[in-house]
Amino acid sequence: MLRKIKQVTYKEIGIVNYISSNRARRINISIKPFNGIIVKVPLNISFKRAEKFVLSKKNWLIKHFSKMKMKEQNSIKQNIINPITREKINNKIIKRTVELANKHNFKFGNLRIKNQKTIWGSCSSKNNINLNKKLVHLPDHLIDYVILHELTHTIEKNHSPKFWGKLDKFVENAKKTNKELKQFPIV
């Protein structure tokens, strides 16, 4: 399947990338740092119709695009002022994961540090833990929260009430801390 792509520049919005998609069920607009505005268009809908839809959302796009640009600039400043070094990754993420696992008797497989764009961490079915290197920019209590969240997945593989109950044993009011974490965008 050959995907069609169309790029249009609007005076007030900027560059919008339209991409035809056989997976899209409806027109989907996303605004991502360093990727800009992407519009996924179902195959049965024309780019012309998608453009009308995008223009009908102009005010929303202007508002959210400016927020996204601020996130990009903050991310660039953060990495210039406080660059991610191997030493920070080792001390703030790797050593801390081992400390917390030992303290709370968690067992995990491999630990990998990645440069992820959308998640802070994950736990595989084999209890391998992946953590985002950008955690070093978070306050220490949120780094601990992400690590403990993933370690808790080694014993409870979902986000059921049982999972949150177990996580609450290690992080006071885990759901509130999870909301606080959402205030820190991954860029």
Image (spheres, helix red, strand yellow):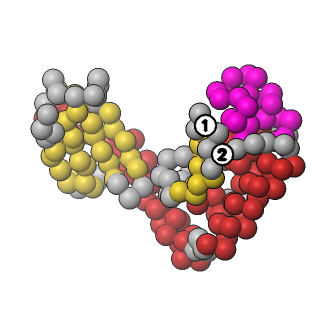
User: What's the amino acid at mark 1?
Assistant: Lys
From the top left corner, tell me how far across and down residue 120 is, in percent: 59, 49
- Residue 87 image position (x, y, % from top left): 66, 74
Circle 1: is it few (<14), some (14-19), or many (20+) Cα within 10 Å? few
Image spot of residue 89 (x, y percent): 65, 66
Residue found farthest to the bottom:
81
Give the residue drawn at x 70%, y 44%: 108
Q: Nearer the viewer, residue 72 or 104?
A: 104
Report the Cα–Cα distance between label 2 and label 1. 7 Å
Q: Is residue 143 in the magenta section? A: no
Q: Secondary structure at mark 2?
A: loop
Q: Quadrant of the N terminus?
A: top left
**Disc sitting over residue 109 in the figure:** 2
Q: Which residues are magenta?
A: 151-171
Q: Which residue is under mark 1? A: 126
Residue at the spot 64% in from the left edge and 27% down from the top edge: 158
Residue contact between numbered discs 2 and 1, judged by CB atoms under 8 Å: yes
123 left or right of 49? right
The type of residue carrying mark 2 is Gly
The reply to whether residue 143 is in sight is yes
In the image, what residue occupies the spot 17% across and 27% down?
43
